[in-house]
Amino acid sequence: MADAATTVGSVVRPTIAAAGPGTSPASQPTLVSGDDDRTVVVLLGPPGAGKGTQGEHLAAALGIPKVATGDVLRAAVRDGTTLGREAQAYMDRGDLVPDAVILGIMKDALTQPSTARGAILDGVVRTVPQAEGLQAVLDHLGRVTTIVLVFVIEDDVLVRRISERTVCDSCQTPYTGHHTGDPCPKCGGRLVRRTDDEPQAVRQRLVVYHAQTAPVITWYKTHGVRVVSIDAIGTRDEVQVRVLRAFSR
Ligand SMILES: [Zn+2]
């Protein structure tokens, strides 16, 4: 895959030059576009590719927070914000929380002082409508998507990797490298595989992932955002080096 897309925003300079704590959290007034220090990274990748872990490493390296949809959603519900209560109502009915509500919560998160210098967005964009919605939010805040990182891993490798996960059916400790039916090293309970981790279920999720993600990648490229593929096979450190390399030019 050639990544010849135009670069919007610019190279990340992980210097600490932002207004420190002590600035008023109430208003985030001057979000002017074109500020090089405000990096917005969008992470894409199939389940099990390790993008959450890599996102955390990257957050530490760049000195900006990782903002994951699940986390901000839980926080909004816990804090009882207007949108959090709205989200809760959907969940209470067993419905999915609509994109508009999620994006509203994301917008709140992106106006916090903690994200003033940038953010790494994990799980925020899975579909083209979500990419468009995020773009609208960023436009409103005078920010741009700096880079999209796509974690690439072969389906077979992923299916094998995920099917190696087991969990204790009594103490719920997760394991890798054990077999189903083995005794739990901690409590002697029985190790089982979660239904979600069965090869059939993983393949089904991957079909959905590929069907949704390919158009998202195309969307970003046609909107002039730099898209970089990261080979996600290897040790955590090996993959981390590849991730950081995407920022070092
Ligand atoms: Zn156990």
Image (cartoon, rainbow, N blue to C red):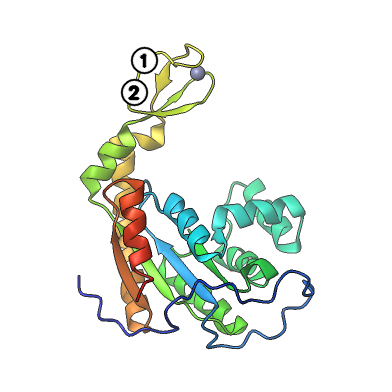
Type of residue at label 1? Answer: Asp
Q: Residue at x 57, y 77 (%)?
A: 137
Q: Which image quadrant for residue 167?
A: top left
Question: Which residue does the image show at 30% across and 52% down from the upper left?
Answer: 238
Residue 4 image offset from top left, x and y in percent: 25, 81
Residue to which mark 1 is pinned: 182
Q: Is residue 236 positioned above or below 122 on the image? A: above
Most foreground residue, 180 or 23 = 23
Closer-to-camera residue (163/89): 163
Quadrant for the N terminus, please. bottom left
Classify mark 2: residues with Cα within 10 Å, few (<14), some (14-19) or many (20+). some
| Whether residue 103 can be seen here | yes
57 shown above or below 136: above
Write the residue at 26% across / 49% down: 233
Residue 58 in picture, x, y percent from top left: 46, 60
For numbered disc 2, what is the local secondary structure? Answer: loop
Q: Which mark is residue 178?
A: 2
State the image coordinates of residue 129 (x, y, percent, origin top left). Answer: 45, 71
Q: Is residue 119 left or right of residue 179?
A: right
The reply, left or right, for residue 154 in relation to residue 246 is: left
Q: Are marks 1 and 2 in contact (CB under 8 Å)?
A: yes
The answer to which image quadrant residue 138 occupies is bottom right
